[in-house]
Image: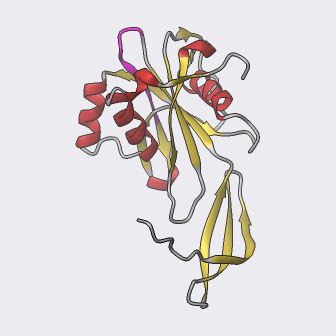
Amino acid sequence: MSEKLPRPERIKRTLVHHGAITDIYADTMRLPDGTEETFDFIGHKGAAAVIPVLDDGRILMVRQYRNAVEDYTLEIPAGGRASVTEPTHECAFRELEEETGYYAKREDVTFLLTMYTTVAFCNEKIDIYVARNLTRTAQHLDDDEYIDVYAYTIDELKDKILKGEIVDGKTIAGLMTYASGISDTGTVLPSGI
């Protein structure tokens, strides 16, 4: 596509609600034809997720209740950054140990991919990592978290995705990318980070 599409212009952003995880805004936009419309926008600090691979190749998954879908979901461990300046790999290390009770050394964690969860109205960006050579520690759950940990082979997880038993977007993107073999060429985190 060689032709550039005209870009709408944001005229005003109004905070509608400040929440614990997200902020909700009403954006007044001037469209390329000159008309004005209001778009919903959800601001998010960003997040990180991790695919924890046990020595036998099985992947640790967490099962937890998600209020938005009113059900339990099976997911890769993940969580929001403490602030917009927190490096996502630090968030990934924290969430790995908090949610699964396993730890990985820096040299055993590689970057896999970056994804936006819902580009139509939210800027949540998640960096997904792969962690290997895990050491068992203990879960450190937040007061409002009740998480069970399970281990599955990648084939079992792909089957769960295809059967609709795994519905979380970051989990599907991360696992299918990992299954493609791309994870073996992931970027190792520099020791100075």
Residue 80 position, x and y percent, is 64, 41
Residue 49 position, x and y percent, is 54, 34
In the rendered view, would you say 54 is above or below 46? above
Identify which residue, 69 or 108, lies in the foreground.
Answer: 108
Identify which residue, 98 or 162, lies in the foreground.
Answer: 162
Residue 176 position, x and y percent, is 34, 36
Residue displayed at 68% across by 39% down: 81
In the rendered view, would you say 103 is above or below 126? above
Residue displayed at 31% across by 25% down: 154
**Number of numbered discs overlaid on the protein picture:** 0
Residue displayed at 55% across by 14% down: 108
Q: Is residue 57 left or right of residue 128?
A: left
Give the residues drawn in magenta, as a range. Answer: 55-63
Q: Is residue 114 left or right of residue 46?
A: left
Quadrant location of the C terminus in the rendered image: top right
Q: Tell me if I can see residue 70 in this picture.
A: yes
Residue 171 position, x and y percent, is 42, 39
In the rendered view, would you say 89 is above or below 171? above
Identify which residue, 152 or 185, lies in the foreground.
Answer: 185
Q: Is residue 104 magenta?
A: no
Q: Tell me if I can see residue 146 in this picture.
A: no
